[in-house]
Image (cartoon, rainbow, N blue to C red):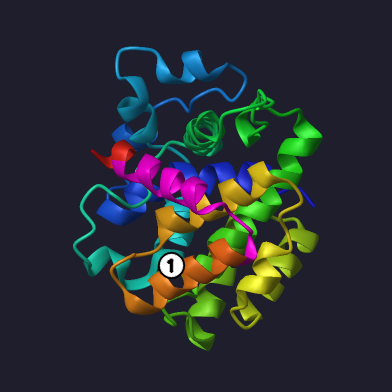
Amino acid sequence: MITRGLLDQLLKSGQQALQGNNSPARQGNPAPSAGGGLSDLLGGSGGLGSLLSGAGGGALAAGAMGLLMGNKTARNLGGKALTYGGLAALGVLAYKAYGNWQSQQGGVAQPEPQTVDRLPALAAEQHSQAILKALVAAAKADGHVDARERQLIEGEFSKLSSDPQLQHWLSAELNKPLDPVEVASAASTPEMAAEMYLASVLLVDQEHFMERAYLDELARQLKLDPALKVELEAQVKQAAA
C-alpha cells in the first residue's frame, strides 16, 4: 500500500478545497521538490509563503479534501487552514518547529530532525501513512462525518487511487471510532509524532471546543513535549501570516 502520492495530492489541494478554487490556472503551479534541503525549500522569490500557497493536485484531490474538511469552509478560518503546498512543505514546518524546540533544550547537541522531507522513500512512506491517518482522524474531531459522508469520502478517494488495499485501509480508518490513543500509536519516531500533530492542527478549527479537546488529547498521547506542541502551533500561525 502506497500512501505518499495520495497524501501529497491532498495536501496540495488543501487551499483550493478551502477557497472553492479549482481553476486550471491555480492547479498548474509546480509542486515543491522534496529532495532539497531546508534552505532550498525556503528560498526562491516567494519564500515559505509562496511554497505554502502552492496549489496543485487537481479537482479530484480537492474534492476529497473538501469532504474531509466538512463545514470548515463556512467558518472564518482566513488563511490558517491548509494553505500549504504538499508533503515537502509539511516537512519544512515540522523541521523548523522541531529544530526550534531542540535549540531550547540546551546541553548536549541534538541530532538533526529527520522529518518527512529529508527521508529516503521507504521511511517517507511510513511517515506518510501516519500523517494520512492523522488527517482522517482530525476530520472526525468535530463529529461531522456521518455514515453518508463516509460513503461520499470513500467514493472520492476511490477516484484518486485504484489500489484496493489503500481503499480498504481508508475505509477502515473512516469507520473507526475517534480514538487519540489509537491514532498516536502510529507514531514510531518523535519526528513522526510532530508531523502527525502538525497535520492535525492544519485541518481542525482550534476555536471549536471538540476539536481543541481532541488536539490536546492527541498531543498527550503522542507524548509531545509542551514546548514542542507550542512550536508546532506557532509554525502554523507564522505560515498563515
Residue denoted by label 1: 67
Tell me which residue sits at (47%, 66%) in the image.
Answer: 215
Vertical arrangement, residue 215 with respect to residue 56, above or below: below
Q: Where is residue 207 in the image (x, y as percent from the top left)?
A: 28, 68
Q: What element carries label 1?
A: helix
Q: Quadrant of the C terminus?
A: top left
Tell me which residue sits at (64%, 80%) in the image.
Answer: 175
Vertical arrangement, residue 87 with respect to residue 162, above or below: above
Tell me which residue sits at (61%, 30%) in the image.
Answer: 117
- Magenta region: 221-237
As shown in the figure, which amino acid type bears the numbered disc 1?
Leu
Tell me which residue sits at (48%, 37%) in the image.
Answer: 97
Asked whether residue 132 is drawn in magenta, I would say no
Quarter of the image for residue 33 reads top right
Asked whether residue 222 is drawn in magenta, I would say yes
Q: In the image, is 83 to the left or to the right of 187?
A: left
Closest to the observer: 202 or 175? Answer: 202
Q: Where is residue 116 in the image (x, y as percent from the top left)?
A: 64, 35
Vertical arrangement, residue 90 with respect to residue 153, above or below: above
Magenta highlight: main SS = helix
Q: Residue furthest front?
A: 107
Q: Position of residue 174 (x, y in %)?
A: 61, 74
